[in-house]
């Protein structure tokens, strides 16, 4: 595991509306090792998506830089694939076609047609969606759509997988299945992952570290909690694990005692 693989250095972000600038993020310093799974948690509106979009190259920070393998991130690229909360599949393409379009774009010049086909199928198998290859998005469930979105992102072989509340729109059971799949895939491939979540259990279950953000405006990193639970992690066993309970309590304490949403804090 290489240290300092991904670095946020003194990131600040302000949005300007007319003559008024609002500072959303300030002084974000974070170093992520290769293969690490990091979750970002914080109250709504604190700037989690803004930070992820800066890493994705979709937004340019007003201060500071992001470095991936020592190179400045300043535009979107296939080395940082994003999975959004609401799948962004193309409705007119099949499950296969939705993954193939990304594979053709990234590997069109380096892999043959049959290699690309095998690679699409390999990634659909990783998320258990190979059987549904000929279906279109409207014919499959929300959880299945998210699986295809994850397959498409993984198929790009990104250096970093960015996930913005990837399971937020799913029911609890589907969510649990997908969390297990993501843990298995992470164990198999060793991807570096940065995931936004609002779910404390999800953050503790999946992550090597949980990055907790203070409330906005001018949000920053309040605390970083290392989750020292051995892998593979099994949710049923963890339910009674004292270290799991300690980590969970630490995140809850940060969010609901020390950084309550302003409206409630004032109440
Ligand atoms: N393009 C933009 N222009 C102006 N303000 C923006 C823009 N994007 C985000 N903001 C503001 O920045 C703040 C942070 O937004 P962001 O979406 O990053 O928060 P978040 O923590 O991801 O929220 P949530 O958990 O609700 O998704 C909000 O106040 C939002 O209104």
Image (spheres, rainbow, N blue to C red):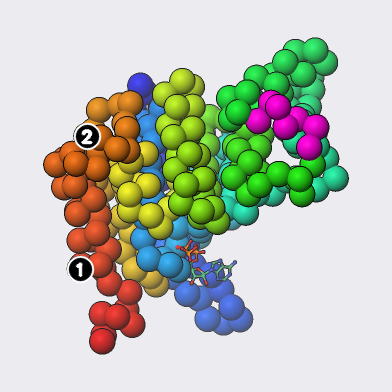
Percent coordinates x, y for residue 246 in the rendering? 16, 47
- Labels 2 & 1 near each other (Cβ < 8 A): no
The residue segment tinted magenta is 129-135
Residue 38, quarter of picture: top left
Foreground pick, 40 / 150: 150
Which residue ends up furthest to the bottom in the rendered image? 267
Q: Residue at x 32, y 74 (%)?
A: 261
Q: Residue at x 79, y 22 (%)?
A: 108
Foreground pick, 167 / 102: 167
Percent coordinates x, y for residue 45 in the rendering? 45, 68
Distance from disc 2 to disc 1, alpha carbons, whole Å, reads: 23 Å
The answer to whether the residue bearing label 1 lies less than 8 angstroms from the nearest atom of ligand 1 is no
Which residue ends up furthest to the right in the rendered image? 92
If the image is split into quadrants, where does the N terminus sit? top left
Task: Report the number of discs.
Answer: 2
Left or right, 237 with respect to 143, comes to left
Which numbered tag is attached to residue 257? 1
Local secondary structure at mark 2:
loop
If the image is split into quadrants, where does the C terminus sit? bottom left
The answer to whether the residue bearing label 2 lies less than 8 angstroms from the nearest atom of ligand 1 is no
Percent coordinates x, y for residue 245 in the rendering? 19, 47
Indicate whether 47 appears above or below 107.
Answer: below
Percent coordinates x, y for residue 6 in the rendering? 43, 36
Which is nearer the N-term, disc 2 or disc 1? 2
Q: Residue at x 25, y 55 (%)?
A: 251
Residue 176 falls within the magenta-colored stretch: no
Estimate how packed mark 2 is, as few (under 14), some (14 to 19) or many (20 or more) residues with alpha carbons within 10 Å. Answer: few
Foreground pick, 100 / 27: 100
Left or right, 156 with respect to 16, comes to right
Mark 2 = which residue? Answer: 228
């Amino acid at each position: 595991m290489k240290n300092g693989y991904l670095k946020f250095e003194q990131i600040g972000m302000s949005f300007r509306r007319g003559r008024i600038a609002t500072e959303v993020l300030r002084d974000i310093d974070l170093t992520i090792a290769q293969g690490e799974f990091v979750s970002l948690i914080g109250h709504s509106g604190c700037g989690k998506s803004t930070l992820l979009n800066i890493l994705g190259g979709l937004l340019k920070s007003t201060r500071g830089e992001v470095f991936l393998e020592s190179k400045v991130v300043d535009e979107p690229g296939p080395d940082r694939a994003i999975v959004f909360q609401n799948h962004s599949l193309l409705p007119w393409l099949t499950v296969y076609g939705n993954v193939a379009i990304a594979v053709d774009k990234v590997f069109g010049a380096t892999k043959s047609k049959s290699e690309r086909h095998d690679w699409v199928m390999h990634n659909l198998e990783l998320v258990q969606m190979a059987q549904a290859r000929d279906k279109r998005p409207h014919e499959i469930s929300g959880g299945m759509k998210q699986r295809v979105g994850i397959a498409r992102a993984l198929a790009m072989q990104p250096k970093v997988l960015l996930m913005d509340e990837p399971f937020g729109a799913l029911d609890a059971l589907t969510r649990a299945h997908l969390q297990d799949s993501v843990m298995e895939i992470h164990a198999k491939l060793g991807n570096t992952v940065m995931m936004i979540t609002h779910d404390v259990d999800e953050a503790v279950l999946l992550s090597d570290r949980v990055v907790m953000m203070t409330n906005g405006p001018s949000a920053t990193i309040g605390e970083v909690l290392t989750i020292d639970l051995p892998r593979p992690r099994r949710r049923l066993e963890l339910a009674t694990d004292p270290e799991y309970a300690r980590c969970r309590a630490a995140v809850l304490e940060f969010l609901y005692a020390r950084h309550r949403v302003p409206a409630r804090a004032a109440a």
